[in-house]
Amino acid sequence: DKQRVRFLEGAAKNDVPKSKASHIFDLVAQFAGYGFNKSHAAAYAMIAFQTGYLKANHPVEFMAALMSLDSHNTDKLATLVQEARRLKIPVLPPDVNVSDADFAVENGSIRYALGAVRNVGASAMESLVAARKEGGAFKTVFELARRVDPKHVNKRAFENLARAGAFDSLDVERRAAMAAAELLTAEANSSASARQGGQSSLFGEGEVADPELPRIEPWSAHERLDEERAAVGFYLSGHPLDEAAEALRRRNVVFSAELTALVEEGRERAIVAGVVRRKIEKISQRSNERFAFVALSDPTGEFEALVPPEVLVRSRDLLEAGMSVACSARLVGRDGETRIILDTVEALENRLKGAYGGMRVIVSDKEALADIKARLERLNARENADRGKVSMVVPTEEGREVEIALPDPWPIDSGARAALKTAPGVLAVEEM
């Protein structure tokens, strides 16, 4: 306001009409909200040119560098991982025997950083990598615990490394490794105390017998992904809706990667589906009503949708983090971007009702049938499960296969298929 007075006074001295001077000052004030001088604009143009060149000519290294820059921001990392996949760059999971503390390039792929796993600490993972480089690859999860510094790698770090799949290469099941976190911590502390006291094992270093891992049923495929998401911040090795992808397409669901193209073709409505990542509620200044922005994740990426007040009132309970939903949405294209506005929200299982015809389970031997039967019976206890025909394909001693149709309808939805895929002796689960 002070500058306006000075400007108008100076303009009057130069015989510029007050209305014109005021209009000119308004333009300057508006531009000053976000305006660069030429030197600043030139610097930004140079950076844009350089980064564009790097992404076009060295995409793997460029994307790995961006992930390193945002290694503690899981929302940014989720976006960058999706962009890497769009560029057909594989993003390999964290691995205590391969990963560095930071993101690294590995044979044309990006190896996920140990330090980017939640609640483990970059410095702790640097000490773990140093122990690996000094003594060679870890052979078992307990040997790893004996070699790391417990001041850096604590119980929470062991738990989250297990949930993220960083111990998978040590041939240990994730849930068992997580349940063993207290044992691993005790092993690390005991070994560190022995080193400080100058003691060594009766059998020599590396010959210590490992304690027994907890005997515990593995997580289902869905639980495994949920635990991975909790440790990494997003789904990395797969997606909970992968199993239902074809059934969703039969129910006219459109995935997020396809939305922009549809809007460009003139499409104004679509059915979308996803797992809720987060919900942010706000109050409209105009109507004083609550509305929300919801981040959803589907097998092709993540997208944000606006939830108007009336839809939020009806569907608030369905829009909690971790819920799987199907939504009728309006699509609004503007300035090359697609805006998604939800009109209805329903539980995903409602949209999938009747989408599956049946399920064929192919097993390696007849000994697997007892465990499969037990799993089916547990699954059958769910009241709202989508049921249908189930058959077993079993090899005979003569080298042939026999297909056995089970009596009565059994659960055949994506949850049932995912649970059976992890059963011992199951080679494949096919849709009928």
Image: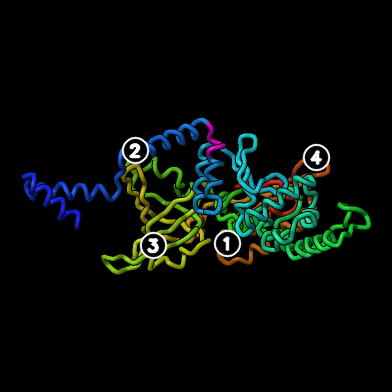
Placement of 59 over or under 233, stated as above or below: above
| Residue that label 1 marks | 385
- Report, in whole angstroms, how far the alpha carbon at label 1 lies from the one at label 3: 30 Å
In percent of width and height, residue 173 lies at 73, 55
* The disc label shown at residue 105, or none: none
Amino acid type assigned to the residue bearing label 3 in the image: Ala
- Tell me: 93 left or right of 241: right
SS assignment at label 3: strand
Amino acid type assigned to the residue bearing label 2 in the image: Ser
> Considering only order in the chain, which callout, 3 or 1, is on the residue closer to the N terminus?
3
- Report, in whole angstroms, how far the alpha carbon at label 2 lies from the one at label 1: 64 Å
Q: Please report contact status of discs 1 and 3: CB closer than 8 Å, yes or no.
A: no
- Report, in whole angstroms, how far the alpha carbon at label 4 lies from the one at label 3: 59 Å
* Residue segment shown in magenta: 58-62
Q: Nearer the viewer, mark 1 or mark 3?
A: 3
Amino acid type assigned to the residue bearing label 1 in the image: Ala
- Report, in whole angstroms, how far the alpha carbon at label 2 lies from the one at label 3: 41 Å
> Considering only order in the chain, which callout, 1 or 4, is on the residue closer to the N terminus?
1
> Considering only order in the chain, which callout, 3 or 4, is on the residue closer to the N terminus?
3
| Residue that label 4 marks | 399
Q: Can residue 357 be seen in this view?
A: no
Q: Which of 87 and 129 is in front in this view?
A: 129
* The disc label shown at residue 292, or none: 3
> Considering only order in the chain, which callout, 4 or 2, is on the residue closer to the N terminus?
2
> Considering only order in the chain, which callout, 1 or 2, is on the residue closer to the N terminus?
2
SS assignment at label 2: helix
At a point 79% along the width and 45% down the height, the residue shown is 136
Q: Which of 9 and 129 is in front in this view?
A: 9
SS assignment at label 1: loop
Q: Please report contact status of discs 4 and 3: CB closer than 8 Å, yes or no.
A: no
Q: Which of marks 2 and 4 is in front?
A: 2
At a point 70% along the width and 52% down the height, the residue shown is 127
